[in-house]
Image (cartoon, helix red, strand yellow):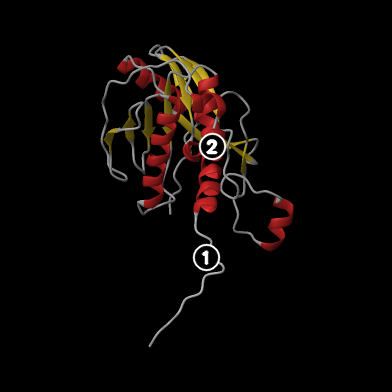
């Protein structure tokens, strides 16, 4: 079997920069490759200007346990060899890309499920949210559909348009009300084109997070419990 040649990352970056120049467009490409002599991996997104210049980078902060890193690796390796051989290097910078078209908030892959990631984007001035993802590990529709739904929540919570881009899963355009403007099927090869709105300002959810929802939920449970009839001492009489 002939091995596929490994594309040099610099060559790949030059090709992407060439596309940005040819299309006179700002591109947000994703990168995933081994570093440090193959002992670790990076997972990040960059912003490339229409002039082909890289002007911003965001490294994934919320990495997946047992998918992108292995907790207690030395111990777990004793019991199993079926674990990822390299850990992803965790990012530490704010989840935004400052681009020529505006400040874009980034949640890579499963970061879309965690409201704190999009709140971090809004804290740092994001006017638009994006969720680049790769759903190749999931061949049914449940996880992909859940991710679209999570992105709808992120759009509503932060009052921002959101773009979800997936080469193997579902891609979507979601407006600030959480409505699906466009959505592809799993693995469908199509280009989605739309006009989105850059927005500013803060919502209560972007300021304080999930606490109001949690308190409301607890209050509803307590109210239902207090208002419910006490059936512990009830007697049921059966007649035949």
Q: Count numbered badges in the picture.
A: 2
What crowding class fits label 1: few (fewer than 14 Cα within 10 Å), some (14-19), or many (20 or more)? Answer: few
Residue drawn at (36%, 39%) of the image: 167
**Residue 96: image tag:** none
Q: Contact (CB < 8 A) between labels 1 and 2?
A: no
- Residue 44 visible from this viewpoint: no
Q: Dot 1: what SS?
A: loop
Please tell me which residue lies in front, 159 or 215.
215
**Left or right: where does residue 144 sit relative to residue 210?**
left
Q: Residue 175 at what x, y percent from top left?
A: 33, 27
Q: Residue 111 at what x, y percent from top left?
A: 51, 37
Q: Dot 2: what SS?
A: strand
Q: Could you tell me which quadrant the N terminus lies in?
A: bottom left
Q: Residue 131 at what x, y percent from top left?
A: 43, 32
**Residue 33: image tag:** 2
Instruction: Name which of mark 1 and mark 2 comes first in the sequence.
Output: 2
| Looking at the image, residue 180 lies above or below residue 232 | above
**Left or right: where does residue 61 sit relative to residue 17?**
right
Q: Determine the image quadrant of residue 193.
A: top left
| Looking at the image, residue 46 lies above or below residue 154 | above
Q: Residue 238 at what x, y percent from top left?
A: 43, 82
- Residue 152 visible from this viewpoint: yes
What crowding class fits label 2: few (fewer than 14 Cα within 10 Å), some (14-19), or many (20 or more)? Answer: few
Residue drawn at (61%, 30%) of the image: 91
Residue drawn at (34%, 16%) of the image: 25
Please tell me which residue lies in front, 211 or 167.
211
Q: Determine the image quadrant of residue 129.
A: top left
Please tell me which residue lies in front, 164 or 16.
164
**Residue 231: image tag:** 1
Mark nearest the camera among 1 and 2 is 1
The outermost residue toward the right is 75
Q: Could you tell me which quadrant the C terminus lies in?
A: bottom left
């Amino acid at each position: 079997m002939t091995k596929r040649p490994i594309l040099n990352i610099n060559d790949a970056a030059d090709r992407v920069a060439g596309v940005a120049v040819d299309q006179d467009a700002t591109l947000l490409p994703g990168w995933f490759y081994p570093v440090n002599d193959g002992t670790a991996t990076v997972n990040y997104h960059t912003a490339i200007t229409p002039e082909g210049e890289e002007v911003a980078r965001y490294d994934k902060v919320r990495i997946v346990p047992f998918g992108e890193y292995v907790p207690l690796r030395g111990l777990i390796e004793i019991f199993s060899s079926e674990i990822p051989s390299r850990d992803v290097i965790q990012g530490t910078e704010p989840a935004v890309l400052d681009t020529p078209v505006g400040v874009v908030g980034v949640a890579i892959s499963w970061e879309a499920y965690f409201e704190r990631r999009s709140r971090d984007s809004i804290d740092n001035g994001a006017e638009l949210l994006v969720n680049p993802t790769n759903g190749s590990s999931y061949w049914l529709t449940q996880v992909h559909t859940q991710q679209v739904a999570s992105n709808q929540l992120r759009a509503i919570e932060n009052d921002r348009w959101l773009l979800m881009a997936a080469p193997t899963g579902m891609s979507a355009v979601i407006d600030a009300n959480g409505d699906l403007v466009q959505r592809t099927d799993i693995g469908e090869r199509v280009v989605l084109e739309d006009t989105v709105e850059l927005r500013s300002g803060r919502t209560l959810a972007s300021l304080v997070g999930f606490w109001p929802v949690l308190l409301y939920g607890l209050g509803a449970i307590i109210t239902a419990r207090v208002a419910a009839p006490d059936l512990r001492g009830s007697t049921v009489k059966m007649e035949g």
